[in-house]
Image: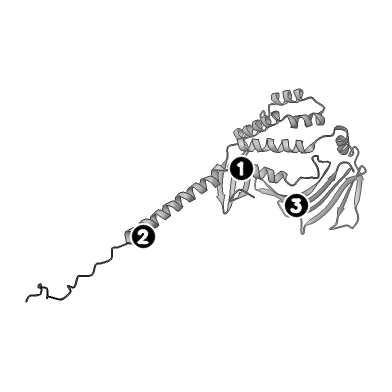
Amino acid sequence: SNSSDVIEGSTPVLPKEEPKSKKGLIIGIVAGVIALVIILLGVFFYMSQFKSADKRITNVVNKAFSELKFNNDKVEKASGNMSIDGKVSVGSTSYSTSLDTKYGVDMLEKLINFDITLNNLNVGMELLDEPLHVNTYITDSKVYALFSNFYDKYIHTNVEGIDEIFNVVEQNDIDYKVVIDGIKEAMTAGLKNADKKQSLKGMNNVIKIELTESNQKKITEAAKKSVLNNDKFLTELTKLTGKDIKTLKSELENEDVTENIKDANGYIELVTNFFGSE
């Protein structure tokens, strides 16, 4: 018989079925995952880079003021640490300094103490071979200073009228926490109102505010508005100035804070980590 005949009693041999190719499905899944990741990264970048600019400004200003530690609701007693690292360029010359400070203030005991470490001081050339340590305190109408790099004893001088720093607290019962919070709120409002650019530098987010005439006006006007709407702050300010709230508001409203503003080459940079928490 020919090959096409089926032999009786035998099982026909069928050709093997080739498995269906999953290549297209795998490519589709991978492409979808990549697209999703790109979308999520884009959303995250937008949220971290631009959307939270105001929150970042608030965090930076709060951090700057958080070094003031209050023992109670007033600044009769305060202590803390402060670090300053600054640089200013004038033409081709740069001036820079960095220092760390511990401080303690007791207004009722009439005592102010600073312990300062000046890490560097550059005025076109570095002036310090090693960190300079200075301890200074004010008490009994005298200012005392100890330069421990050079001497083992304090030097002091009388400062006429220094006790007035302490007397103002006793006489007027000023709530300095309200004063400081008012300044903080005004600063935050001003910076938020400015035109700004953001960029990522490594894992840091940088908000840059150019000190143009326009930005200076926006900052000062927003800060002034914040103060005018802060009655608690103005109430404490009356104790400092001896003027009533109505007079203070009138003077602030009539004050032309932008009268002599010109474009400046300077700028402010506010730096936070990627998530804006530090």
> In which quadrant of the rendered image does the N terminus lie?
bottom left
Q: In which quarter of the view is residue 176 placed? A: top right
Instruction: Examine the rendered structure and indicate whether residue 195 appears above or below residue 21.
Output: above
Q: Amino acid at mark 3?
A: Leu
Q: Residue furthest front?
A: 9
Q: Amino acid at mark 1?
A: Lys
Mark 1 = which residue? Answer: 55
**How many C-alpha atoms fall within 10 Å of the one at disc 2: few (<14), some, or many (≥20)?**
few
Q: Assign a secondary structure to mark 3.
A: strand
Q: Assign a secondary structure to mark 2.
A: helix
Mark 3 or mark 2, which has the lower sequence index?
Answer: 2
Q: Position of residue 66 (x, y in %)?
A: 72, 45
Mark 2 or mark 1, which has the lower sequence index?
Answer: 2
Q: In which quarter of the view is residue 70 placed? A: top right
User: Of circles 3 and 1, which is in front?
Assistant: 1
Between 88 and 23, the one nearer to me in the picture: 23
Q: Position of residue 40 (x, y in %)?
A: 48, 50
**How many C-alpha atoms fall within 10 Å of the one at disc 3: few (<14), some, or many (≥20)?**
some
Q: Assign a secondary structure to mark 1.
A: helix
Instruction: Examine the rendered structure and indicate whether residue 89 appears above or below residue 167.
Output: below
- Which mark, by number, is residue 26? 2
Look at the numbered discs 3 and 2 and tell me whether their residues touch, using CB distance below 8 Å.
no
Mark 3 = which residue? Answer: 99
Mark 3 or mark 1, which has the lower sequence index?
Answer: 1
In this picture, residue 45 sits left or right of residue 237? left
Q: Amino acid at mark 2?
A: Ile
How many angstroms separate mark 3 from mark 2 (CA)? 59 Å
Between 21 and 276, the one nearer to me in the picture: 21
Between 97 and 54, the one nearer to me in the picture: 54
User: Of circles 3 and 2, which is in front?
Assistant: 2
How many angstroms separate mark 2 from mark 1 (CA)? 42 Å
Q: Residue at x 72, y 44 (%)?
A: 65
